[in-house]
Amino acid sequence: MNKYSYNARTRFRQIKGLFSFCEMKSDTYITNIIFNIIKQQYIVLKRHHSVRLNKNKDFKK
């Protein structure tokens, strides 16, 4: 496994974790801002790495 794919997968997992964490605690103003930033990053990352990540069963919901 090369470094790039590992970093992409780790980042995807981190963002997915933060995404679900912020969904639970999306009541405060600052959390909403962070949630929106994470959401944008998540969408971009998913678009760029969807072909690679969909082959791996760990990332399917």
Image (cartoon, rainbow, N blue to C red):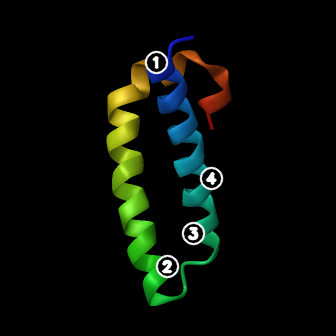
Label 3 packing within 10 angstroms: few (<14), some (14-19), many (20+):
some
Q: Which residue is mark 3?
A: 22
How far apart in space, not on screen, are marks 3 and 2 (Cα)?
A: 7 Å
Residue at the outermost bottom position: 28
Q: Residue at x 51, y 13 (%)?
A: 2
Numbered disc total: 4
Earlier in the chain: of badge 4 and badge 3, it is 4
The secondary element bearing badge 4 is classed as helix
Q: Which residue is mark 1?
A: 52
Residue 36 x/y as whole percent: 38, 67
Q: Is residue 41 above or below residue 8?
A: below
Residue 54 x/y as whole percent: 51, 22
Earlier in the chain: of badge 3 and badge 1, it is 3
The secondary element bearing badge 3 is classed as helix
Which quadrant, please, contains the C terminus?
Answer: top right
Q: Residue at x 54, y 58 (%)?
A: 19
Earlier in the chain: of badge 4 and badge 2, it is 4
Label 2 packing within 10 angstroms: few (<14), some (14-19), many (20+):
some
Q: Which mark is residue 19?
A: none
Do labels 3 and 2 touch, CB within 8 Å?
A: yes
